Structure formats: structure tokens, C-alpha cells
Image (tube, rainbow, N blue to C red):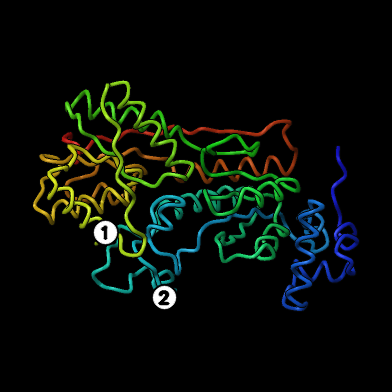
Amino acid sequence: MTKRPTLYDVAERAGVSIATVSFAFRQPHKIKESTRITVVEAAREVGYMPSASARALVRGKAGAIGLFALDPVGHAGTEAVRNASSQPAGGVSREAVETGFPDDPNEDFRLFPLYHDEVQRGLEMECRRRGYVVIVGEGNNASTEADIAEVASRVDGVAVFPNTLSGEMLRLISKQMPVVELSNPIEDNGLHRVSVDNAAAMKSLTAHLIQHHGLRDIAFVGPLGFPDKEHRYKGYTDAMIEAGLPVRTIPTPDEQDPIQDVRRTIQELEAKNELPQALVCSMDAEALLYMDALSQAGIDVPGQVAVTGFDGLVAGLVSRPTLTTIRQPMFALGCEAASILIDEASGPSTRPVARELPVKIVLRESCGCG
């Protein structure tokens, strides 16, 4: 087994003391920013990440698991929606997050971050059951490598929501501890993962619209370039191509003002007489926005346009019409991720662990069923 790089290797490469390296990762405010950057670059070059187990022994604390997710505060709704699943439609204040109430009394409760909450709850419950604690870190463009390392250096493994950490950072962390991605990667990166069969599920739902409802003009709505959404798009395209139908896409709503953007999209499509017979959305949050916009425009769902989602949020059950969707086992995803990390921390596997959990197609009113 290759010897892991140490604090001494980083200090030698950076030309600084061991104490300076320690400060760079644990208390960066105590050193110059230029020095911190030098240390971080040296650590990257030698492949160093502070050891969670060593620091745990020094501190005499129990094991911990890290979870990297987008911070819902200060992120526009669709930006967060792009990177994982259902997130707020608009920036949310700290008070709104802490109290659970929107800033604007007219704001839509349905679009609060339920997907992340459920996955995190599952991870926390499994960790608690097995005597571990959870440390949550923010993964986004504003986070420095020192910020990320501060969390990674305090845990025995990390779970990561899609698009929260760069591929380079994931590879660096994975050299020191197990990493579980909460998604299907677009390409095999050798990391552990917990996911659902996004492609097969979306293919089945699209085929239902074609075969059961006789729909031919079906458009896919959702962001591309994000792992789970790419797989869902593939499932949609497979079903359309097999049926000899044209593939059609509609971009995800603009992150700055998704509600108005969706309304404009519907108005433009209607004005051009290009409304599809169905909208297959990559997530429930977007499906709900489109159903609202269609209703406001006087377009009947599902009479004129059928709408489907993906996630299985409670919001879809209480919407009118009720939302046809693919229900993910969100709580179970978190439990499985924690289980893999804790097991791997005790005894690493010889190959990456990949667990694919079942989903359920829920047929309701928005597609013409129910």
C-alpha cells in the first residue's frame, strides 16, 4: 500500500514549518493568505489531506461523518435545484430557514428544500444509531479548500450531494477516507455511491405517456450537465427514440426569477402554437412551477398538457391536480450512505460500493390518471 503523505511532506514542499501547515488547515485566520495558498497548493501537489482518525485520537472524540451540501441561504432556487433536487424558488433569509417560514407570506411553501432535508435526516438517523455524529459542510464556489479541509479533517468519511465539490477535491479526499456520492456519476470515478435507477424510471414514465395516453409531442424540462438529470434525460430520450418520436427539450427555469421565467416560457410556446402535449420534468419542483403557469394561462392540466415530475415530494400529493411523479426513497438514500461510510471506515472494501435503491412510479391526475 502506498505510504500516505504527511504533514512533514507538505511542510517540506511549501518551505514552511509544521505548525504553519497545521494553522493553514485548522486556523487559517492566523496566517497570511499568501502563506495559506502556498500550503494548500503544496498539499494538493503531494496529495495530502489531514487525517480524520489521527485527529480523533488526539481529541479523544467519537467518530463523525461529514455531509457536503449546498447552503440554502443566499442561493437562488433554481441554482440549488440544478445541483441536487428540490430547493427554494428564490434566496432565503437565515430567519426563514431557522423558523421554517418564508420571508414573504405569499411565498410558496412547496418549494422549500425537502429533498436535501429527507436525505440528511436519513444519514443522521443511521449515524446516531451507530454512535456517530454528523458534521455538515457547505460545498459551493464560495468555499475555500481550507473550509472543505476543515470539515474533512474532522470526520472518518464524507457523503456528497451532486455538484457540491469538484472532481479534483473528491479525488483528493478519497485518498484519505471513504467518499460516497449521493447520485449516479456521469462517468465512473471509482468512488462509492448510493443512487436510484434514474434512466430506467424516467424511460418507464415516458413510455406510459406514449403507450397509455397516446401522447406524441413530449418535451423534457430540466438542466443538463448534472449527473442525476443526465440519466433522467437519457431515459426520456430512449423511450422517445424507441417509439420513433422526436426528442424535444425546454431549458430549466432561470435561477434569478424562475416563476416569471416559466410563465414567459408558457406564453411564448402558446403564442407560437408550440405547446407540447406533455412536459416531463426532471424534478417535482419544476413540475409544480409549470403546472401553476399553465393554470394561470388558462391551459388545462392534463386535458391540454400533461405534466410529470421526479422526486416524490409531499407537495405533489397536495397540489391540484395531483402530480404524477417518480418517488425516490430519500430517507433511505441517506441511511445507506451513512452505512457505507461507517462500514468502510472500519474495514475498507477492495472495490467501490455501489447501491441502487428502488423507485416507484406514482400515477396521479396530472398525466390523466388517478
Q: Position of residue 123 (x, y in %)?
A: 55, 49
Question: Please, is residue 261 above or below residue 3 in the view?
Answer: below
Name which residue type carries label 2: Glu
Which corner quadrant holds the C terminus?
top left
User: Residue 95 bears which disc, if any?
Assistant: 2
Q: Which residue is mark 1?
A: 261
**Residue 132 relative to residue 259: left or right:** right
Question: Please, is residue 282 above or below residue 37 in the view?
Answer: above
Q: Residues within 10 Å of mark 1 (few under 14, many from 20)?
A: some
Q: Nearer the viewer, residue 69 or 315?
A: 69
Counting every numbered tag in the picture gives 2
Q: Secondary structure at mark 1?
A: helix
**Residue 78 relative to residue 331: left or right:** left
- For the point 26% across and 59% down, which residue is it? 261
Farthest left residue in view: 298
Q: Position of residue 268 (x, y in %)?
A: 18, 52
- For the point 78% across and 77% down, which residue is it? 31
**Residue 22 relative to residue 292: left or right:** right
- For the point 73% across and 75% down, which residue is it? 33
Residue 366 is drawn in which quadrant? Answer: top left
Q: Position of residue 250 (x, y in %)?
A: 29, 45
Question: Please, is residue 135 above or below residue 368 in the view?
Answer: below
Residue 293 is drawn in which quadrant? Answer: bottom left
Q: Secondary structure at mark 2?
A: helix
Name which residue type carries label 1: Asp
Quick check: marks 1 and 2 in contact, CB under 8 Å? no
